[in-house]
Amino acid sequence: MHVLVLGGTTEARRLAESLVELLPAGARLTSSLAGRVSGPRLPPGEVRIGGFGGAEGLAAWLRTHQVDALIDATHPFAGTISFNAAAAAAAAHVPLLALRRPGWVPGDGDDWHAAGSLAEAAAALPALGRRVFLTTGRMGLAAFAGLDELWFLMRSVDAPEAPHPARMEVLLDRGPFTLDGERDLIRRHRIDVVVTKDSGGAATAPKLTAAREARIPVVVVRRPPVPRGIPVVDGPEPAVEWLREHLRHGPRPTAARTQSSG
């Protein structure tokens, strides 16, 4: 039995921690990380870092390493790997599950502005504020590079590369973040608008509460869709149950794996 988890998220680590207890003796658990963040928090089990070479490369990896189940627990905005996983799983005849934590939901007092992309978020900013707390990560900063009249506080785990906004201060930090810390950050930097992706989860949610308390708008970039036809669960526990059900039927025979690769 071999399970491959496409990870890099808190949920993926929690899933790996559960699976090392669930899988029978002799079974393999491999977590794959994209390698875009330096010093990642490694899950238990085997770990590989780096891409597969697209859908065809992932399908070849699934066959070569005789993977019996694939769980896509990547970041909600890691859209390319999710579609590659769907194509690869279909080509290699490997069951696929998507694990996506629930998105954030606005509450009373929130002033949220939905955007379909980083470009849409950038276009909305001049009408909303002048001092921006940008929490969309270091990728995609080019969308905000032309907003020279605005000042940005950009927070990410690793330092960004150009192109990026001309007037920008970089804060290197990693969640989880506290509400008191986010309140202080917004007050100290005189932030009047926040930009975030709808990543979901509790680790980075305090900024939303702090923005609501400060009565400042938040531009929220919507998530890309999960590939059609892929079952989706919202946490590690139902993912474990999905795999437990798969285990009841046992891994595919070796002959079936060989035939699928030919």
Image (cartoon, rainbow, N blue to C red):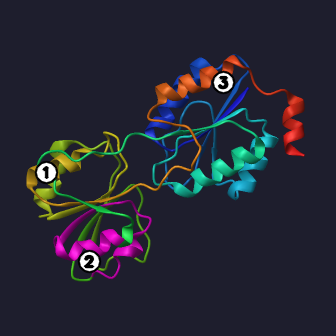
Amino acid type assigned to the residue bearing label 2 in the image: Arg
**Residue kind at label 3, given as amino acid type:** His
- SS class, disc 1: helix
Whether residue 11 is situated above or below residue 183 in the rendered picture: above
In three-dimensional space, the C-alpha distance between marks 2 and 1, rounded to whole angstroms, equals: 25 Å
Disc 3 or 1, which lies upstream in sequence? Answer: 1
The magenta stretch spans which residues?
A: 120-147
To which residue does mark 1 refer?
212
Q: Which residue is mark 2?
A: 167
Look at the picture and state if 178 lies above or below 212. Answer: above
Q: Position of residue 69 (x, y in %)?
A: 68, 33
Percent from the top left, x then y, of residue 249?
72, 19
In the image, is residue 217 part of the stretch drawn in magenta?
no
Question: SS for tag 2?
Answer: loop
Q: Residue at x 54, y 42 (%)?
A: 7
Residue to which mark 3 is pinned: 246
The image quadrant of residue 136 is: bottom left
Q: Is residue 171 above or below residue 124?
A: above
Q: Nearer the viewer, residue 77 or 40?
A: 77
Viewer-nearest of discs 3 and 2 = 3
